[in-house]
Image: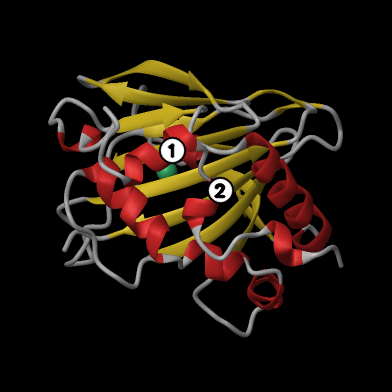
């Protein structure tokens, strides 16, 4: 296995000078998601490109084999059980590969701990960064997940609302670090504003940060690129304090 020193203990160490200004509360983005009109932001100028590329290399070498397939296809009954014209309802569909950090016994979680990825994603500066963008304090003990999109992988329209979770049902913050191989031609996030899927942003940059004030409707288009193209996503899910 490659040296895990490429994965820093603190998220802060993946940031470039611009990114550190978010943590220092001197960046325009601070509190951006507290704006009632703003639910989403994407930036490709906050991470150190060289460090991010090294992290991606370690993920590919150490985790690619332990990822679990996430495969939620379109149910056929969503068409054939319809009884009324235009009455279609689509549950959340998706295809990618993932590591959920819920169970520490999973092979993927063990591998993520071994290379220091779990430590990075549980680092205090990861939460501090999310909190700076959110413009409000966030709880300790946040959720983490790793996703890897390969060619054709996508996430269908969904809103990430969790009405059964008392702590999340009034909304929460997701922070995603997205790392693309050079073979990614395109992948887009489409999201809703004022009731329409009118907004579209590219996800194919080498090292981006996206932040979401959930819930709202969005989807991720199929990744296009070479056979070995991949987009890795490191996700943190943060509840308000
Ligand atoms: Fe989502």
SS at badge 1: helix
Q: What number of labels is visible? A: 2
Q: Say if residue 92 shows up in the picture.
A: no
The residue at 20%/19% (across/down) is 194
Where residue 213 appears, x then y in whole percent?
27, 41
Q: Say if residue 54 shows up in the picture.
A: yes
160 to 183, vertically: above or below? below
Q: Residue furthest bottom?
A: 105
The residue at 34%/40% (across/down) is 22
Work out whether mark 2 precedes mark 1 in sequence or the reverse, and give the earlier one: 2
Q: Is residue 100 left or right of residue 2?
A: left
Residue identified by numbered label 1:
19
Q: Quadrant of residue 215?
A: top left
- Front residue (pair 171, 177): 177
- Front residue (pair 113, 107): 113
Where residue 75 appears, x then y in whole percent?
55, 45
Where residue 71 appears, x then y in whole percent?
64, 52
- Front residue (pair 171, 78): 171
Where residue 7 appears, x then y in whole percent?
66, 59
Q: Quadrant of the C terminus?
A: bottom left
Any atom of ligand 1 within 8 Å of the CB at mark 1?
no
Q: Quadrant of ligand 1?
A: top left
SS at badge 2: helix
User: Which numbered tag is attached to residue 14?
Assistant: 2
């Amino acid at each position: 296995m490659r040296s895990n020193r490429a994965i820093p203990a603190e998220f802060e160490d993946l940031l470039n000078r611009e990114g550190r200004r978010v943590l220092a509360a001197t960046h325009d983005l601070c509190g951006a998601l507290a704006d009632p009109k703003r639910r989403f932001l994407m930036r490709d100028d906050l991470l150190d490109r060289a460090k991010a590329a090294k992290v991606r290399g370690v993920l590919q070498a150490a985790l690619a084999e332990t990822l679990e397939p996430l495969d939620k296809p379109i149910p056929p009954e969503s068409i054939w059980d319809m009884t009324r014209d235009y009455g279609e309802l689509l549950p959340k569909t998706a295809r990618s590969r993932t590591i959920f950090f819920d169970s520490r016994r999973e092979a993927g979680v063990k591998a993520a701990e071994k290379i220091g990825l779990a430590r990075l994603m549980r680092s205090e500066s990861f939460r501090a960064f999310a909190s700076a963008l959110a413009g409000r304090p966030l709880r300790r003990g946040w959720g983490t997940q790793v996703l890897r999109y390969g060619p054709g992988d996508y996430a269908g329209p969904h809103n990430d609302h969790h009405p059964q979770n008392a702590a999340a049902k009034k909304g929460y913050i997701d922070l995603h670090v997205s790392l693309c191989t050079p073979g990614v031609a395109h992948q887009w996030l489409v999201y809703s504003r004022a009731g329409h899927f009118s907004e579209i942003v590219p996800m194919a940059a080498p090292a981006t940060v996206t932040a979401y004030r959930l819930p709202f409707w969005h989807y991720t288009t199929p990744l296009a690129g070479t056979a070995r193209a991949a987009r890795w996503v490191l996700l943190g899910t943060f509840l308000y304090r």
